[in-house]
Image (cartoon, coloured by chain):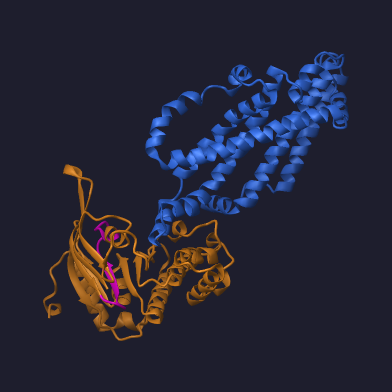
Amino acid sequence: MTGRPPLSSRLLCGAAGVAGLFCVMELAGRSGLIDPIVFPLASTVVSRAAALAADGEFLADVASTLGAWAAGLLIAVLVAVPTGFLLGTLPRVEAALRPVLEFLRPIPSVALIPLALLLFSDRFDMKVAVIVYAAWWPVLINTMYGLKDVDPLAKETLRSFGFGRMAVLWRVSLPSTAPFIATGVRLAAAIALILAISAELLAGGASGIGTFIIEAGGSPDALEYIIAATLWAGVIGVVSNGLFTLAERRLFHWHLARTEGAR
Amino acid sequence: MLEISNLTHTYGSGPGAHHALGGIDLRVTQGELVCIVGPSGCGKSTLLRSIAGLLKPTGGTITLGGTPVDRTPDDLAVVFQDYSRSLFPWMSVADNVALPLRRKGMDRGRRRAAAEEALEQVGLAGASGKYPWQLSGGMQQRVSIARALAYRPSLMLMDEPFGSVDAQTREDLEDLTLRVRNHHNMTILLITHDIDESVYVGDRVVVLAKAPATVVGDLRVDLPGPRDQITTRENPAFVHLRAEVGRLVRGMRSHPAAAS
């Protein structure tokens, strides 16, 4: 706990930083350091972004991106956690699949978008498929890592009371891996958003933040729209990360209390 | 109630093999508190893990209440030295104590009541809603003892149970163990490397030699009860016994006067 300022003062510092950057950008534009025609004024971008928040068409695009994001993330978690447990508890299966995993993992997920385009005729399905693929890695890796971290003495304690393998898995391995899985999900959520928008940018499609950005390219105020929409993508990323962090702290306060106490 | 005959265990094989147990014979009768003492690394924990069914010994037999131990026996509980790792941090103190009772098919209400009762016996009546990591080391080990007590085992195994707490807490926990033993008439097998502790707590002290462990001494502790940290420890019989156990642990020949 020491060395870290309280949350309220950290929020204050953060807000000051954002405000400072805004002022610098605005001044650079107004003083002519950056030509407002080349790069719009900060105030123009913010007012454009505020207008977008009331724009039904843009909101539908946001909803579409978030829908694919949520669906992809959910499927990824539902597949990755059981797979992680399977690989973590059966060393032979893990040894057999490790080369495949090691080969696939370094491939940037974005590089698979053209392949996904060929495989899926529906754009939404394609988007979800790419998100599932990208998001399942951090969840899988964290689940396996968390399982390795389960204290053997905790498992032995339950065994000494006569509990079987499945009971030990359910009552010790799962709860003690849960904080690691949660961290994996938080990382996966950020990656899923990147992939959702990348897929929209590369493949177009009916709707989505990425689609909005592509289509805005044709309008006279293209730059303002593109930056304003990008700003919203950033806001969504920050808010989702904040919510996941908050949930982790609430659910796994025991994990935090222990790791911070050990320092 | 516990019979161990010619128990051997070897880790690994070939020239690198480690012979931990070299033929151990031991009988413990119902209601006895037997302390097993020996130098560190002598195979005490291997012996305990074999009795608990956590480890399959290479040779010999263990029977508990007449049935051979080939898996974890049903009415046995273990108190480990490392309470912070043995208690589950995601559960409240009461839930930790109540968890093993699921094995007994007790419903939620009865589990809860049994946990509260056990916690009261170890002097932690007010702590049931807390988390283990919010308690001091000594209190955490009390929770482990409560968890074992609530299970009402016929045999309680304790593996260096007071090795990670300060001297004052250690004395408190020794007295707590004696108190609950009298209350429940439980059979306890306590493993320790502390010679004074073995004599103070035990009805019998069994001394193991360095690995491969064998029984080199089996002494009955005839000290007047109830035992007390000050008067018992200054009793000439206590002083004599601890010297005797000390010699055996160090591998010296028994003192002639004690052989009688």
The residue depicted at 53 percent of the width and 68 percent of the height is: B107
The residue depicted at 51 percent of the width and 26 percent of the height is: A105
> In the rendered image, which quarter is residue A135 located in?
top right
Q: Could you tell me which quadrant the C terminus of chain B lies in?
A: bottom left
Q: Could you tell me which quadrant the N terminus of chain B lies in?
A: bottom left
x%, y% of residue A62? 77, 30
The reply to whether residue A156 is in sight is: yes
> In the rendered image, which quarter is residue A52 located in?
top right
Of B205 and A106, nearer the camera is A106
Of A81 and B97, nearer the camera is A81
The residue lying furthest to the front in this view is: A121
Question: Which chain, by letter, is orange?
Answer: B
x%, y% of residue A40? 84, 19
x%, y% of residue B54? 33, 57
x%, y% of residue A35? 84, 14
In this image, B27 relative to B253: left or right? right
> In the rendered image, which quarter is residue B32 located in?
bottom left
Question: Which chain, by letter, is blue?
Answer: A
Q: Judge whether B230 appears above or below A247 on screen.
A: below
In the image, which residues are magenta? Answer: B29-45
Of B240 and A173, nearer the camera is A173
The residue depicted at 42 percent of the width and 30 percent of the height is: A98
Q: Judge whether B209 appears above or below A237 on screen.
A: below
Of B60 and B42, nearer the camera is B60
Q: How many marks?
A: 0
